[in-house]
Amino acid sequence: MTQKSLPPDLHADTLAVRVAVDRSQYGENSEALYLTSGYVQPSAEVSARRFAGEEEGYTYTRSGNPTVSSFEMRLAAMEGSEAALATATGMSAVLLMLFSLLKSGDHVVYSQSMFGSTIKLIGTEFARFGVESTVVPQTDLAAWQAAIRPNTKILFAETPTNPLTEVCDIAALADMAHNAGALLAVDNCFATPILQRPIALGADIVMHSGTKYLDGQGRVMAGALCASEQMVNEKFMPVLRNGGMVLSPFNAWVVLKGMETLGIRMRAQSASALALAQWLEQQPQVARVYYPGLPSHPQHALSMQQMSGLGGAVLSFDMKAGTPQDARLRAFHVLDSLQTLSLCTNLGDTKTLLTHPASTSHGKLSEDQRQAAGIGQGLIRMAIGLEHPDDMKADLLRGLDTLK
C-alpha cells in the first residue's frame, strides 16, 4: 500500500505530517491504527501469491501492517532513503542489521564511544559466533582506516555519541568504507533527520531508536533501519520475518504521531541545550561540558556543518573532583538534589532527563572500556526537554550550590 504521490522536494517538517499509507474508505485524516495480527484474504489464489511474495498485500503482522508501513514510509522519506524497516527497539534494529549482513569470519569496525549495549552486542555476543571486531576512537579517521581488514564488512558509527557527544565525519567514513568494499552504518538517534541525514553524506544504513526523539514523549519502544530498497527487501526483511523482532502496530502509531512534532521539538530543545551548556561552562563546580553547539567542542565546526547549524538536545558535563570516588559522590549529590527534572536513563522526552552513565547505560562495561570511552565517575548526561531553561538552571543549582 503506497501513498498517493506528494509533490517533490518537500521539507522534512512537511514529510513528518503527510507521508503515510493511503487513507481507508472512511477518509480518516489522522493515520489509522490497525490492531490486527492477521488479514482476511480475498481468495486462496491471491493468498498464495501474497505469501510467495508475488503480489503486494498484507498476510500476517509479523510480515507487515499498514500502521507500521506508515511509520516506515515516513521515516524513509525524512531520512532520504529508499526504504525503512521498523523493529521492536533500537537494539533490535542493531541486532537485525548484524544478523542480516554478517557471518562467522567477518569483521566490524566500530567506535569505542558507542552506546554500551551496542558495544556488548558486537564485542561479546557476536564474538561467540565468530564475528571479529575492532573498536577505534570515534574521531580518529586514521585509526578507522588502520583497523580495516580484507574481511571488514561494516563500519558502524554513532554521531553524536552517547554520552560525550563526539562527532565523526560521515562523508569521510563513507568514502573509507566504500573504498574497502564495506558498508557504513550510522546511528542517527541523537541528531534525527531534522538535523542530520547520513544517507545524503554517503552512509548506506541509518539506524534509529524510535524510543527516543521520534516518539518524543517517552511512551513506547521502537527501532528502525533505513537503507536501499534492495537491502531492506533482500537482507533485512527475511531475517525480520523469521526472527520476529517486529514493531507492534500500536507502538508504530504512537511514534508516527510523535514524528509530526519532531522538527518543532528538536529546534526548541537544541536551543535550550545550547543555553544550558553555555551556562554550565560558567559554573565553578563543573570541570568540562560536552556539547557540539559550543565552540569549545573539538568537533564544533564539523557538527555545525553536518547538523544543520544546531548541536542537538543532549549534553554531558564532568564534575570537578579529586578522585573517582569523590567524583561519583558529587555527581550523585547533584542528581539526588533534583526536584523538577527527572533522574531517568531514557532521552528524547519532553521532560528533561539526567543520568549517571558510568553506573547506568555504560555500567556493564569494564572500567578499562569506560576509561577508553572517556566516561568517568563524575560525568552526568542531560537530555534537554521542554521546560523553561531558567527552571532547569535553578534545579541544577540545588545540587551544585550545596556541594561540600
Image (spheres, grey):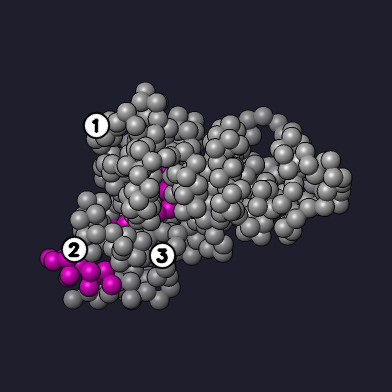
Q: Determine which of the numbered discs, if any, sits on residue 345 in the image.
A: 3
Q: Residue shown at 29%/47% (left/top)?
A: 112
The amino acid marked with disc number 1 is Ala
Question: Relative to 193, is 313 on the left or the right?
Answer: left
Of the numbered discs 3 and 2, the one sitting upstream in the chain is: 2
- Front label number (3 vs 2): 3
Task: Tell which tag, 2 or 1, sits nearer the viewer.
Answer: 1
Residue visible at 35% across and 33% down in the picture:
152
What percent of the width, then of the height, locates residue 209?
50, 52
Q: Earlier in the sequence, mark 3 or mark 1?
A: 1
Q: Could you tell me which residue is drawn at 55 percent across and 34 percent down?
A: 231
Residue with the mark numbered 2: 320
Q: Pointers 2 and 1 in contact (CB under 8 A)? A: no
User: In the rendering, at what x and y percent does residue 29 appear?
Assistant: 78, 51
* Distance from the alpha carbon under mark 3 to that under mark 1: 34 Å
As for residue 112 lying within the magenta part, the answer is no
Relative vertical location of residue 179 with respect to residue 37 in this rendering, above or below: above
SS of the residue at dot 2? loop
Question: Circle 1 sits in a helix, a strand or a loop, which is it?
Answer: helix
In this view, the residue in front, 336 or 274, is 336
Q: Is residue 261 left or right of residue 113?
A: right
Which of the two discs, 3 and 1, sits closer to the camera?
1
- Determine whether 281 is above or below 132 in the image: below
Nearest the viewer among 23 and 1 is: 1
Q: How many marks?
A: 3
Neighbours of disc 1 within 10 Å: few (<14), some (14-19), many (20+) = few
The quarter of the picture where residue 11 lies is top right
Magenta residues?
304-332
Residue found farthest to the left: 322
- Marks 2/1: CA distance? 35 Å
- Tell me if residue 15 can be seen: yes
